[in-house]
Amino acid sequence: MVRKIVKINEELCTGCGKCVTPCVEGAIEIVNGKAKVLREELCDGAGFCLAVCPTGALTIEERETVPFSHEAVEEVRAHREVEEIFCHFCGNSEYDKALFPIRYKGDSVWACAQCLPRLIHG
């Protein structure tokens, strides 16, 4: 099956782990200091991980791979401890406000729906 999936450039990856949290499906993990898509059936190709990578190591490519599996994602979610994320500007949790991955002053951070208009309009 041909579909979109995350590709990680190991030469650019610093192993910071910022891409792991936005991957709610659990496809990305840090292995030996580098981000890896361990199970391609978990990657939905949405690319939320791309926006938070400080080095641009992640891209989306269209290629032959296994089909996306909702069942595999649910299995991983049942056993995965997810790190809560917060707005860089006000500290709101992802449970308080919608959060968006953004680049701000050269850093990859999260901004909540409340703070985003202020950032856009100054």
Image (cartoon, rainbow, N blue to C red):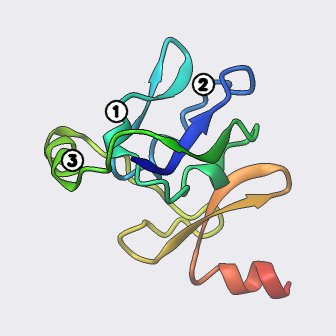
> Where does label 2 land, which residue?
15
Residue 74 image offset from top left, x and y in percent: 17, 51
Query: Does residue 26 appear anywhere in the picture?
Result: no
Q: Which numbered mark, 1 or 3, is in the foreground of this view?
A: 1
Q: Amino acid at mark 3?
A: Arg
* Pointers 2 and 3 in contact (C-beta within 8 Å): no
State the SS at label 3.
helix
State the SS at label 1.
loop
Q: CA distance from mark 2 to mark 1?
A: 18 Å
> Where does label 3 land, which residue?
77
Q: Amino acid at mark 2?
A: Gly
Q: Amino acid at mark 1?
A: Arg
Residue 43 image offset from top left, x and y in percent: 40, 46
Query: Does residue 108 appear anywhere in the picture?
Result: yes
For marks 1 and 3, the one nearer the N-term is: 1
Q: Residue at x 15, y 39 (%)?
A: 79
For marks 2 and 1, the one nearer the N-term is: 2
Q: Residue at x 67, y 79 (%)?
A: 116
For marks 2 and 3, the one nearer the N-term is: 2
Residue 103 image offset from top left, x and y in percent: 75, 58
